[in-house]
Amino acid sequence: MSSQAYTIWLTGLSGAGKSTLAQALSHRLEEQGIVHEVLDGDVVRTNLSSELGFSRKDRDTNVKRIGFVAGLLNRHGVPVITAAISPYREAREQVRAHIGRERFIEVYVKASLDTVIARDVKGFYEKALLGEVEAFTGINDPYEAPINPQLTVDTDLESVDESLERIWNHLATRGLVVTSREAVTIR
């Protein structure tokens, strides 16, 4: 297993399942004794970017701040899981370049608009559809899906556990984690 630090960048619409998958993956890493950090877009925005609005420039600034922190942690040997809408390809590509292509693992957490609207317990999508919220990603502001992510998980079709297994297996094929079978053998 490699000791290389990496950043798993979960990107997708609000309600696609990014934070849920980040927490599930974090739990799995903890079970294997892998020290890591989770950078959730909402938490980072509240603590490091509270002065920012939701213009394209402000969203890009927030994404770049998350990328800066992830890169810093990676340089000190800490794997990072990010869960951030990060709606614009150009900003994600800038973060990829900052972190390093070999360390940046883009995972597109795909879900249909119908699915994310159904999951929206706070009613943000409904408000955006009614015109009460401006610049809401996926409704009246674009989400630019990754063109060539390292992995796509479709939460319309996959359970959290199925998506988690696909992410974990991708990491295992890169030598970044061990599979459950390997973990039993090592012990």
Image (spheres, rainbow, N blue to C red):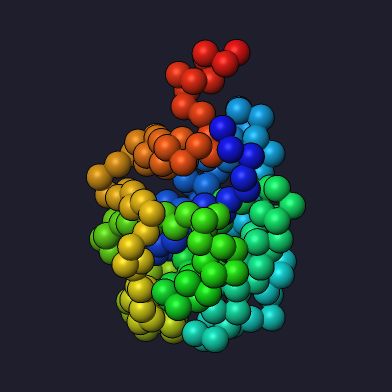
Report the number of discs.
Answer: 0
Question: Toward which corner of the image does residue 12 lie, by quadrant?
Answer: bottom left
Relative placement, left or right, of 45 versus 180 is: right
Can residue 108 be seen here? The reply is yes
Residue at the image point whose x is 58% and y is 38% from the top = 2
Residue 176 pos. (x, y %): 54, 39
Considering the image in quadrants, where does the C terminus appear? top right
Residue 110 pos. (x, y %): 33, 57
- Of 15 and 48, nearer the camera is 48
Residue at the image point whose x is 52% and y is 14% from the top = 184
Relative placement, left or right, of 16 versus 102 is: left
Q: Is residue 38 above or below residue 129?
A: above
- Of 66 and 90, nearer the camera is 90
Considering the image in quadrants, where does the N terminus appear? top right
Residue 8 pos. (x, y %): 52, 52
Residue at the image point whose x is 35% and y is 36% from the top = 162
Q: Is residue 61 above or below residue 153?
A: below
Relative placement, left or right, of 140 versus 41 is: left
Q: Is residue 79 above or below residue 59?
A: above
Q: Is residue 80 above or below residue 101?
A: above
Find the residue positioned furthest to the right. 76
Can residue 24 be seen here? The reply is no
Residue 50 pos. (x, y %): 68, 75
Residue at the image point whose x is 59% and y is 63% from the top = 99
Question: Toward which corner of the image does residue 165 lie, by quadrant?
Answer: top left
